[in-house]
C-alpha cells in the first residue's frame, strides 16, 4: 500500500517579530489533516485514527529549548482538535521526558482535572516501566506514558540535523520514550532507531506523526544554532513514520544544498536507520520515494 | 543486613528540601547494610555540574570525551554513551560528582579481592552509569540508567571518607556500576582518603584511556578488572565494548605496580571454550606474570541474557585447571560458596593458606605476607 506524506507551508505563519501566529498554525494543521486523509473536515481525519473515548499521548521534542522545540501553538491546536471530536481534555497527554525540558520549551506541567495534561516521564507518579522491553538490539525500559497511561499516540517531533543520527525527525523522537537513549547512538543510530520504533507499545499506539517544520535546523543539531536554522514555515504529516522521515531527509538535504553544505552522506552521517525501518525485518513503513505520495499544500 | 527504605530514610535522614520526584525513579538509593540512625544523609536535589577533566573542545560546541576509549563526540545538550556526562554549550560536565546512588559496607572478598586485606570491610559505593552495556549485568538497574533515574545522595568526597572512617572500613571500594564514569568523584575521594588513612580500590571493567588511568593510580591501592572474555567478538556482541583497551589497561596496571586481580565471568556457550581460556591464561602469564589472581566466577541468567543456564560447576573447574596447568599461581572459583576453589593455596608447599566460604574467612595462614608453613612470600597487600 502506498503511503501519503503531506507538507503544508504557510507563508504568513510568523509575525514580524518571528513568533508563530496561532490561527495560522491551526489553519495549516487543519489543511494538512484534510490533505492527509482526503476528508472535508479535519475532525473526520482524526476520528478515523482514534477512538475518542481513549487517551492520546502527544510526544514532543523539547531538547533544544524554546527556539527549536515542538511549538506550543501547534501542540495546543492539535489538542483542541482532539478535544473537539470528543476526547476528554484530561485524556490528551502532552509529554516529554523531563519537566525541565518542557519548561525550557515554554510548557508548564499541568495535571489539573479538566485541563489538557502536560506531563513528563520524570513527573511524580509516572516513571518508566518496571520490566525491560527488547526489540532487535535494543533493551530498554519505556516511559509509562507509552506503556500504561495512553491508549494512542501522536508523535510531534521537530525536524533537525543531528550530529550522530544525521537526521532527527519522527522516529528518532521516540528515543525520548526509553530510559537509555545514550546507549544507541553508534553507527548513526542504525538499527537502533528502527528497533525502538518496533517496540509494540510504540509501533501499535502511534497513529500519526505531525512534524513541526516551522523552524528547521539543517546543520549543527541537535542543539539550537541560529546560524543554521531556517524559518521554513511548514508542518509535515503522515500516518507512516518511515515515509515521513524519508521525505524529511529530502527536505533537510535540499536545505543543506541551498546553503552550500555537504550532504549528510558525504559527512558520514547518512540516516541509514530510515532504510532499516523500512526493511523486511522491521516493516515499519515505506522508505522508498517511489512508494510515497508526497502532497504539498501552500497557504498564504 | 538492614536495608533502608524510603520511609525509614525520611524518618532518620537529615533531609533538606528535595525536589526530586522520587516516585518516578525505578531504581537506586540502595543502602543495604548501612545504619540510617548513625548517619544522616542528604538526598541530592539535582545533578552535579562539576566540569569533566578529560575532554577537548571541538568546533560548534561539540566536545570529545577523552576519558575512555569510546571517545564520544558529544553535541550541545547531549550526553556521552555512559549517560552521566553532558555537554552544555561546549563545556562538558559530570552529572554524578558527589551523587552516589548505592552505599554498602561489604567484605572486601565480595569485590572480589582475595589478596588485599583479607577479612576487612570496604565502604562500597557507586553512581548511576556505565561505559559498556554487558548483557549479563547484575547491577543493570543502576549501571544502565541515567542519574536522574536513580535516587541519589549528596555525599561530597570529604563526607564519603568520613563515612568510611565512622564505619571502621579501612578501604573505600568504587564498585557496582563502572567507577571510570564517575572518575572525578573517585579521584578526589581516593586522594583525600589517603590523607586520612583510608585506602581506595577500583572495581572496574578497565575501559579507560591510559592518561586518566595513570593519573588515578597515584591515589589507588588495588584494582580489580573484569576481563569479560578473550575475543573481540564477545566484547563487541555481548558487552558493546572492545578487548584490546582492556588488555592495554592490564599492562599499564602491571607497569605501574598496583595490586591487581582479574575476574572472568564464565558464560555458558559464549566464553567457556577451553582454548579461549587457555589463550587468555597464556597472555596473562606472558604480560602480567604468574602471580596475578584470576577468579573464574559463575554466571546466573540476568538482564538481557536470561536464555542461558547458570554456569555448570564443572566448567568453572575446567577453567581453573586450565589456568593452573598454564602456570598461574592463584586461581579461584567464584559464586560457588564452599567450593575448594575459593581457598588460597601456597604455590610452593601446596597447603591451604586462606580458607574461605562465600565472603567469610575461616582461617588465614598468611603471616607477614608469607606462608606460615614454608615461608614463601605470597603476593598481595596484607597489612
Ligand atoms: S566516559 Fe562516557 S562520555 Fe566519556 S568516552 Fe566514555 S562513554 Fe563516552
Image (tube, coloured by chain):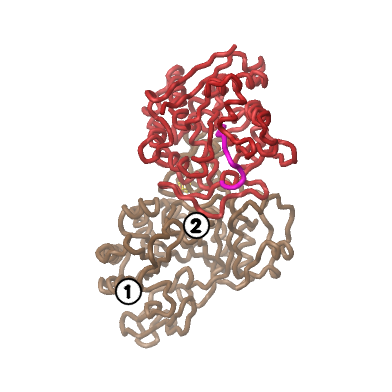
Chain colours: A red, B brown
Q: Magenta residues, as a range?
A: A147-156
User: Farthest bottom residue?
Assistant: B373
Q: Secondary structure at mark 2?
A: helix
Percent coordinates x, y for residue B25 in the rendering? 61, 53
Q: Which residue is mark 1?
A: B314
Q: Tell me if residue A169 comes above or below residue B198 in the rendering.
A: above
Residue at the (60%, 44%) spot, across then down: A145
The residue located at (49%, 65%) in the rendering is B201
> B55 or A261, which lies in front?
A261
Labels 2, 1: one chain: yes
Asked whether, in this view, residue A96 is left or right of residue A167, the answer is right
Q: Which residue is mark 2?
A: B140
Q: Which image quarter: residue B314?
A: bottom left
Q: Is residue A273 left or right of residue B23?
A: left
Left or right, residue B378 beside residue B203: left
Q: Position of residue B83 (x, y in %)?
A: 52, 47
Amino acid at each position: 500500500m502506498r503511503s501519503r506524506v503531506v507538507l503544508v507551508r504557510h507563508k504568513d505563519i510568523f509575525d514580524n517579530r518571528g513568533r508563530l501566529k496561532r490561527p495560522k498554525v491551526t489553519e495549516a494543521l487543519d489543511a494538512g489533516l484534510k490533505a492527509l486523509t482526503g476528508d472535508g473536515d479535519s475532525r473526520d481525519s482524526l476520528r478515523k485514527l482514534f477512538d475518542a473515548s481513549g487517551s492520546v499521548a502527544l510526544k514532543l521534542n523539547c531538547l533544544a529549548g524554546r527556539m527549536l522545540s515542538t511549538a506550543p501553538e501547534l501542540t495546543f491546536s492539535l489538542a483542541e482538535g482532539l478535544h473537539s471530536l470528543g476526547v476528554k481534555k484530561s485524556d490528551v497527554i502532552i509529554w516529554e521526558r523531563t519537566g525541565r525540558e518542557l519548561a525550557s520549551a515554554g510548557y508548564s506541567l499541568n495535571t489539573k482535572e479538566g485541563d489538557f495534561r502536560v506531563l513528563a516521564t520524570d513527573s511524580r507518579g509516572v516513571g518508566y516501566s518496571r520490566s525491560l522491553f527488547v526489540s532487535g538490539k535494543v533493551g530498554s525500559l519505556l516511559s509509562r506514558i507509552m506503556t500504561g497511561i495512553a491508549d494512542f499516540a501522536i508523535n510531534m517531533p521537530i525536524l533537525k540535523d543531528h550530529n550522530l543520527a544525521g537526521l532527527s525527525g519522527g522516529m528518532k523522537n521516540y528515543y525520548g520514550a526509553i530510559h537509555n537513549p545514550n546507549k544507541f547512538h553508534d553507527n548513526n543510530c542504525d538499527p537502533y532507531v528502527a528497533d525502538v520504533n518496533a517496540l509494540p507499545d510504540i509501533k501499535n499506539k502511534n497513529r500519526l506523526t505531525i512534524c513541526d517544520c516551522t523552524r528547521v535546523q539543517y546543520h549543527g543539531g541537535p542543539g539550537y544554532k541560529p546560524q543554521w536554522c531556517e524559518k521554513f514555515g511548514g508542518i509535515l504529516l503522515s500516518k507512516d513514520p518511515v515515509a515521513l522521515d524519508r521525505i524529511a531527509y529530502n527536505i533537510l538535504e535540499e536545505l543543506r544544498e541551498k546553503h552550500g553544505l555537504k550532504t549528510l552522506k558525504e559527512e558520514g552521517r547518512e540516516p541509514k536507520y530510515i532504510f532499516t525501518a523500512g526493511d523486511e525485518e522491521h516493516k515499519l513503513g515505506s522508505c522508498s520515494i517511489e512508494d510515497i505520495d508526497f502532497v504539498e499544500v501552500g497557504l498564504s | 543486613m538492614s536495608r533502608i527504605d524510603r520511609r525509614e530514610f525520611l524518618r532518620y535522614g537529615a533531609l533538606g528540601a528535595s525536589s526530586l520526584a522520587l516516585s518516578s525513579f525505578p531504581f537506586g538509593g540502595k543502602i543495604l547494610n548501612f545504619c540510617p540512625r548513625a548517619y544522616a544523609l542528604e538526598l541530592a536535589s539535582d545533578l552535579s555540574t562539576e566540569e569533566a577533566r578529560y575532554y577537548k573542545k571541538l568546533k560548534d560546541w561539540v566536545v570529545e570525551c577523552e576519558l575512555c576509549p569510546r571517545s564520544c563526540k558529544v553535541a550541545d545538550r547531549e550526553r556521552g554513551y555512559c549517560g552521566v556526562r553532558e555537554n552544555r554549550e561546549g563545556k562538558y560536565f559530570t552529572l554524578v560528582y558527589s551523587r552516589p546512588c548505592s552505599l554498602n559496607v561489604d567484605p572486601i572478598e565480595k569485590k572480589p579481592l582475595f589478596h588485599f586485606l583479607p577479612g576487612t570491610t570496604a565502604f562500597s559505593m557507586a553512581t548511576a552509569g556505565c561505559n559498556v552495556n554487558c548483557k549479563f549485568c547484575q547491577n543493570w538497574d543502576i549501571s544502565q540508567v541515567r542519574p536522574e533515574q536513580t535516587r541519589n545522595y549528596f555525599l561530597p568526597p570529604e563526607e564519603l571518607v568520613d563515612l568510611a572512617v565512622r564505619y571502621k572500613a579501612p578501604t573505600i571500594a568504587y564498585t557496582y556500576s563502572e567507577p571510570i564514569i564517575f572518575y572525578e568523584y573517585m579521584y578526589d575521594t581516593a586522594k583525600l582518603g589517603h590523607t586520612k588513612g583510608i585506602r581506595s580500590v577500583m572495581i572496574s571493567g578497565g575501559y579507560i584511556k591510559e592518561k586518566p588511568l595513570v593519573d588515578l593510580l597515584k591515589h589507588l591501592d588495588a584494582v580489580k578488572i573484569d576481563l569479560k572474555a578473550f575475543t573481540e567478538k564477545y566484547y563487541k556482541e555481548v558487552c558493546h565494548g572492545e578487548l584490546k583497551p582492556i588488555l592495554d589497561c592490564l599492562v599499564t596496571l602491571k607497569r605501574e605496580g598496583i595490586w591487581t586481580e582479574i575476574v572472568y565471568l564464565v558464560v555458558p556457550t559464549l566464553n567457556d571454550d577451553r582454548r579461549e581460556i587457555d589463550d587468555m591464561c597464556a597472555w596473562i602469564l606472558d604480560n602480567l606474570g604468574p602471580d596475578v589472581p584470576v577468579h573464574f566466577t559463575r554466571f546466573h541468567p540476568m538482564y538481557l541474557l536470561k536464555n542461558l543456564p547458570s554456569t555448570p560447576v564443572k566448567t568453572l573447574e575446567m577453567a581453573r585447571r586450565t589456568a593452573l596447568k598454564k602456570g598461574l599461581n592463584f586461581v579461584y572459583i567464584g559464586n560457588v560458596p564452599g567450593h575448594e576453589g575459593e581457598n588460597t593455596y601456597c604455590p610452593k608447599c601446596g597447603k591451604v593458606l586462606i580458607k574461605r566460604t562465600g565472603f567469610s574467612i575461616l582461617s588465614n595462614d598468611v603471616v607477614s605476607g608469607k606462608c606460615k608453613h614454608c615461608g614463601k612470600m605470597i603476593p598481595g597487600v596484607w597489612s
